Image: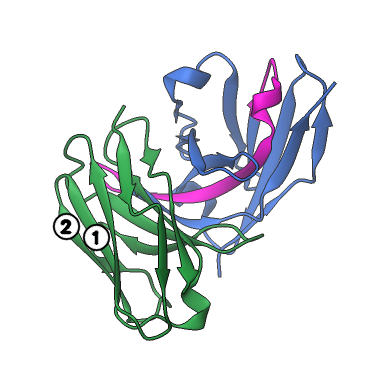
Chain colours: A blue, B green
Amino acid sequence: QVQLVQSGAEVKKPGASVKVSCWASRYSFTSYGISWVRQAPGQGLEWLGWIRTSNGDANYPPKLQGRITMTTDTSTSTAYMELRSLRSDDTALYYCTRIVTGPTGGYLDSWGQGTLVTVSS
Amino acid sequence: DIQMTQSPSTLSASVGDRVTITCRASQSVNSWLAWYQQKPGQAPKLLIYRASSVESGVPSRFSGSGSGTEFTLTISSLQPDDFATYYCQQCSNYPYTFGQGTKLEIK
């Protein structure tokens, strides 16, 4: 069974950066992409983008362009999501997911346990 | 961005009921529509992908249908374990977007 294990909770001050890791196991890491999703307290789901693990190509939503970077380390089957210039409204539970991609689309078939990022002065 | 609108936002139902949740897209997403179930304190779980394909291990009472801009998730006979929040997501056009969620409550 696919496993995605994320790093622990973080508390950051406004303006700081956070880097969340996601260790994947029990499947071929470079055969699937990794996508990130966040959920603010009591709110719905927001897609943060995805990275093609085979070549490092990434796609981010316009509202986060310039603040977010997704990377991978294929030697350790680990994905990373870095968010910079943190604001209070970045406080959320951040999930990594495995994304299954087809020629024209995809879906998220496995989810990590989530990492709580709190931004507070 | 493609806007995904779910209805209703909240649904009250009883065990054994048949329920349907609708998801409408602001433009065609072909069949790249997925449904997820989220219980309190848990990560979302994939139920349906490509609009109508049931994920392995998901009970057969869950089904999905639709294409283009209108989709439905149906639970044929509600079980106690099904009371949760359900989200649709389009993965056809960037940025991939979620519906706002439908909370299924016990009547």
The residue under label 2 is which amino acid type?
Answer: Gly
**Is residue A103 shown to the viewer in this render?**
no
Q: Is B107 in front, or is A56? A: B107
Which quadrant of the figure has residue B92? Answer: top left
Which quadrant of the figure has residue A9? Answer: top right
Residue A119's label in the rendered image is none
Left or right relative to B56: residue A81: right
Q: Residue at x 24, y 46 (%)?
A: B24
Left or right relative to B14: residue A103: left
> Residue A6: where, in percent of width, then height?
70, 49
Q: Residue at x 47, y 36 (%)?
A: A50
**In this view, B4 is above or below B103:** above
- What chain letter is assigned to the residue under label 2? B
The residue under label 1 is which amino acid type?
Answer: Thr
Q: Are marks 2 and 1 in contact (CB under 8 Å)?
A: yes
**In this view, B101 is above or below B60:** above
Q: Residue at x 62, y 39 (%)?
A: A40
Nearer the observer: mark 2 or 1; the answer is 1
Magenta stretch: includes residue A103: yes
Q: Secondary structure at mark 1?
A: strand
Which comes sooner in the sequence, label 2 or label 1?
A: 2
> Residue A56: where, in percent of width, then height?
49, 31
**In this view, A89 is above or below A76:** above
Q: Is A101 in front, or is B78? A: B78
Label 2 sits on residue:
B66
Q: Would you call the spot at circle 2 few (<14 residues within 10 Å), some (14-19), or many (20 or more)?
A: some
Label 1 sits on residue:
B72
Q: Which residues are magenta?
A: A82-105
Give the farthest residue toward the bottom.
B16
- What chain letter is assigned to the residue under label 1? B
Q: Secondary structure at mark 2?
A: strand
> Residue A47: where, in percent of width, then height?
47, 37
